[in-house]
Amino acid sequence: MIRAAILPAVGSPLEIAGIELPEPGPGQVRIRLAAAGVCHSDLSLSNGTMRVPVPAVLGHEGAGTVLSVGEGVTHVAPGDAVVLNWAPSCGTCHPCSLGEIWLCANALTGAANVHAVTEDGTELHPGLNVGAFAEETVVAAGCVLPAPDGVPLTDAALLGCAVLTGWGAIHHSARVRQGESVAVFGVGGVGLATLQAARIAGASTIVAVDVSPEKEALARAAGATEYVVASENTAREIRKLTGGHGADVAVECVGRAVTIRTAWDSTRRGGRTTVVGIGGKDQQVSFHALELFHWGRTLSGCVYGNSDPAKDLPVLAEHVRAGRLDLSTLVTERITLDGIPGAFDNMIAGKGGRALVVF
């Protein structure tokens, strides 16, 4: 038996309990986790904003060491350091055929599988395919990528979601160019990664926006040149900080209607807004036809940073090794499995950056 954080039902508190994993079957890999990040998506799964088969072992951002592999697995072997990829592409669906693997229609089919059982025999599902809130996990081979050399394994866990998402929002979705101005809404784990990505892209003015004044030091350490405490005047403040025009790019990492609308209002005429945050169906954003025509702005969604993890991880690793990307600054709390409920509470309260479960 190994310890894991279990979501017994949507809306229920997590339970730390023993589970039993099967040995890896054909095309599967068993991994001992080194670390797992506590992402806002895990909170969204627990409260029903996103659907997940339950009961489930949550956690989707992680890294660890291969313990054993099933038949047919050749790209990793026991002893290898690996990063988990929670959204493996099938390679055959329509989005994959277009090269848009981040929109793979079959990426999350594994979440419906039976992943493990509790001590009383209750069947468990793997939250977002990988079930990383556990000492060990068994995943499909497509969920495993070799960890890059020269990156500490605990830090490498962050590459599996927060950093890929923030990097991709800047480089793949918004396609920030040298000298452009960027506003980032929400200074959590993904927001901090987005700020670093904007700095690496050569953005000039980088404005961080959050409801908490206490996050200013975190934001500036990540690359923010300006900090705005969110209010009804946020869009006006950002325009003042960007020559009166508005930001070239806004990245929304919160998932709330008011924040998405404010991000859009904060950009210049012809500006681009990328929405990374995951909101509920009740978060309705309204625009009128004339302003859409007049402002000529672009509003786009962004799934997993519109990234190809196999291609982007080596790029990110090079930035880490060169000192341009500092993964440790994303982490404001290192915890055990028992600390995950508290990390959820901190996210709800808007406190801190990324909490990292270290095994």
Image (cartoon, helix red, strand yellow):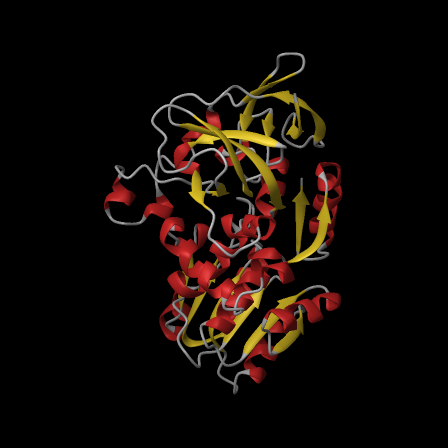
**Residue occupying image coordinates x 63% and y 30%:** 10
Along the line of sight, the residue nearer the viewer: 20 or 178: 20
| Image quarter in which the C terminus is found | top right
Q: Quadrant of residue 331?
A: bottom right
Q: Quadrant of residue 87?
A: top left
Query: Does residue 267 appear to the left or right of 134 in the view shown?
Result: left
Residue 169 relative to residue 8: left or right? left
Q: Is residue 282 visible?
A: yes
Q: Residue at x 47, y 25 (%)?
A: 112
Residue at x 70%, y 71% (from the top left corner) = 217
Can you name the residue that lies furthest to the top here?
120
Compared with 131, 339 (above or below) is: below
For the residue pair 123 and 21, the one nearer the viewer reads as 21
Quadrant that contains the N terminus: top right
Q: Is residue 266 visible?
A: no
Q: Is residue 198 left or right of residue 122?
A: left
Residue 116 is situated, as x and y percent measured from the top left of the image, at 56, 21
